[in-house]
Amino acid sequence: MPPVVPKCLALILCDAVRRGEGGVGTSIVNAFDIFEIPSAPAVTKPFSIWLQVTDGNGATTMRLVIEHVLAGSPAAALIVPARFTLDFRNPNSVLEHVLVFDAGIGLPQMGRYRLRLTANGTTIAHRYFVAAPTP
């Protein structure tokens, strides 16, 4: 039987994630897909990444990588890797996870970047963002 691969329901870049009273409910503060930077290389503003996954089974090794997508090439350069584990006690559960980058991250160039989420080594979602000059 093939391994169970969770499904990603949401993968969002935002300024912050707030939990409701008693940990119930989630508020995403200022979702975005463009980092405005004065010039490159640069360090981004602080930000968070919020994700939701479901349909997993047991302890699952997750990895979120931020990659620079190289122009004219299928290759991507690793910028930041982040590993964490989610425990799917019930495959019908929807689990949330927040990664906080209080110091921002270094972006070497203007251009296209990608968030790529893996579960036990299998890519389950990706989302693109852009580093663009400050207007």
Image: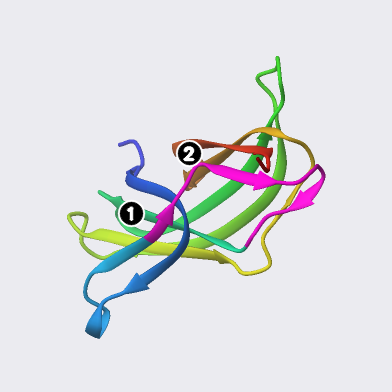
Residue 88, x across and y down, in percent: 30, 61
In space, the residues marked 2 and 1 are separated at their CA atoms by 16 Å
Residue 82, x across and y down, in percent: 60, 57
Asked if disc 2 and disc 1 are in contact, CB closer than 8 Å, the reply is: no
Q: Does the stretch in magenta take in 30?
A: yes
Does residue 18 sit above or below 46 in this rendering? below
- Type of the residue with mark 2: Thr
Magenta-highlighted residues: 29-45
* Label 1: which secondary element: strand
Residue 24, x across and y down, in percent: 21, 75
Residue located beneath label 1 in the image:
52
Q: Residues within 10 Å of mark 1 (few under 14, many from 20)?
A: some
The residue located at (17%, 55%) in the rendering is 92
Would residue 15 be found to the left or right of residue 71 on screen? left
- How many marks the image carries: the answer is 2
The residue located at (62%, 69%) in the rendering is 102
In terms of depth relative to the viewer, which is nearer, 49 or 4? 49
Identify the residue at the far top of this view: 72
- Give the quarter of the figure containing the N terminus: top left
Does residue 51 sit above or below 103 in this rendering? above
Residue 118, x across and y down, in percent: 49, 44
Does residue 77 sit above or below 8 in this rendering? above
* Label 2: which secondary element: strand
Residue located beneath label 2 in the image:
122
From the image, state whether disc 2 or disc 1 is nearer to you: 1
The residue located at (64%, 59%) in the rendering is 45
Disc with the residue nearer the chain's start (2 vs 1) = 1
Identify the residue at the far bottom of this view: 22
Name which quarter of the figure residue 70 lies in: top right
Does residue 120 sit above or below 88 in this rendering? above
